[in-house]
Amino acid sequence: MAFGLFKKSDKKQEVSSGPHYYDLTVKKLVEETKDSISLVFEQPASGKLKYKSGQFLTLIANVGGKEVRRAYSLCSSPFVDEDLAVMVKRVDNGLMSNWVPSNLKPGQKMKVLEPMGQFTTEFAKENKRHLIMFAGGSGITPMMSILKSLISQEPESICSVIYCNRDVDSIIFRNTLDQIQTEFEGRVHVIHILDNAPMNWQGYSGLLSKEMLVKLFERIPDWGLDKTTYLMCGPEGMMKNVDTLLKELHIPQEKTFKESFVTGVIDKEKKEEVKAAVKAGNTSHEVTVRYDGQEYKFVVEPNRTILETALDQGIDLPYSCQSGLCTACRGRAISGKVKLDEEEGLSQSERAEGYVLTCVGHPITDDVVIEIG
């Protein structure tokens, strides 16, 4: 795509040839709101961890006697920040999101999986583009990483941030966003929208509607479609609404990119469809997985995924969300057929090239060979 813009996973994900796991030292925990913190890690002693703005770290911890993995977007920038930082927001019944702020202390070590993710862009000083970001709640996290890198690396580019929250107290990185907007006046525009606005609120309130979006677009620079890219990250409902609104305004789909934080919820109808496909003949199938210089062969039973079967056999394949969204488990099926419970994490072109997600993948032929990394 032109201007080094975001990819919808159209390119094979790069996996480093070095160690995939790191034990990072916690440097500090910074309270952002009453229910969210920035978790700051020191760089590993072996050398700086390489990552791209918009990627995530997978945190790994033993919670209640069970290994738990969760993906958290990096809010730090590889161009600006010396340390690595992710934002963790408490959610009801969230295992990792509640364990981290209650248990981690500076100086402790935490196991993480190397940075991954496709919600990224390449930066170049000659670029001149306009990124329009739609964020909701913790969806501001990857946007913060991208924003800091953009203003650092592309002096001719600008960014508009439309940020939706419940109320004033739930605005994550509020002070940082204010400081960036002040320092880079004319290049960074931040517009807050609150569900519950105080009496003295001068900004927008309520749900983001088409009428509100039209008014917002009147406030931000219009650089034309060829130089504008639309990004979204936040609650599923918000992203669907933004997606619909942009389509109504005739914004081409190839100009919009999104990152989902939602734990995969596969609807009942799709589950039944997958079960029917997997149960055709009620047959187990052998799968070959090539990863990190090794080749593994194992039999996957009906209604079992490729990933869970591999993990049960002690094969340490990469994964994070286990719901078909983060793409940490992505591989390419160079032969055979794989049925996916959830395809949201893959682009259309990626699926056409044979990419699959092992965490939601079921083999439906005997000749499945998957290459990861």
Image: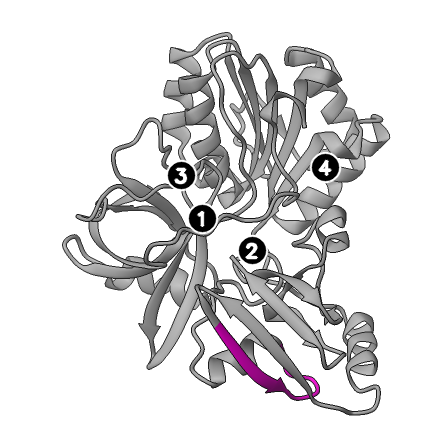
Q: Amino acid at mark 1?
A: Phe
If you read the primary sequence from the N terminus, does the residue marked by circle 4 or circle 1 appear first? 1
**Mark nearer the viewer, 2 or 4:** 2
Disc 2 and disc 3: Cα gap in Å? 16 Å
Disc 1 and disc 3: Cα gap in Å? 9 Å
Q: Residues within 10 Å of mark 3 (few under 14, many from 20)?
A: many
Q: Determine the residue positioned at 76% across, 21% down.
A: 214
Q: Determine the residue positioned at 80% across, 70% down.
A: 270
Q: Is residue 362 magenta?
A: no
Q: Residues within 10 Å of mark 1 (few under 14, many from 20)?
A: many
Q: Does 213 appear above or below 316?
A: above
> Residue 326: which disc?
2
If you read the primary sequence from the N terminus, does the residue marked by circle 3 or circle 4 appear first? 3
With 75 as the anchor, is 270 left or right in this view? right
Q: Position of residue 68 (x, y in %)?
A: 40, 71
Q: Amino acid at mark 4?
A: Val
Q: Which residue in the protein does label 1 denote? A: 56
Label 4: state its secondary structure. helix
With 328 as the anchor, is 104 left or right in this view? left
Q: Which residue in the protein does label 4 denote? A: 242
Magenta residue span:
295-305
Q: Amino acid at mark 3?
A: Cys
Q: Position of residue 99 (x, y in %)?
A: 33, 65
Disc 3 and disc 4: Cα gap in Å? 23 Å
Q: Determine the residue positioned at 56% across, 44% down.
A: 118
In this orientation, which residue lies closer to the viewer: 107 or 175?
107
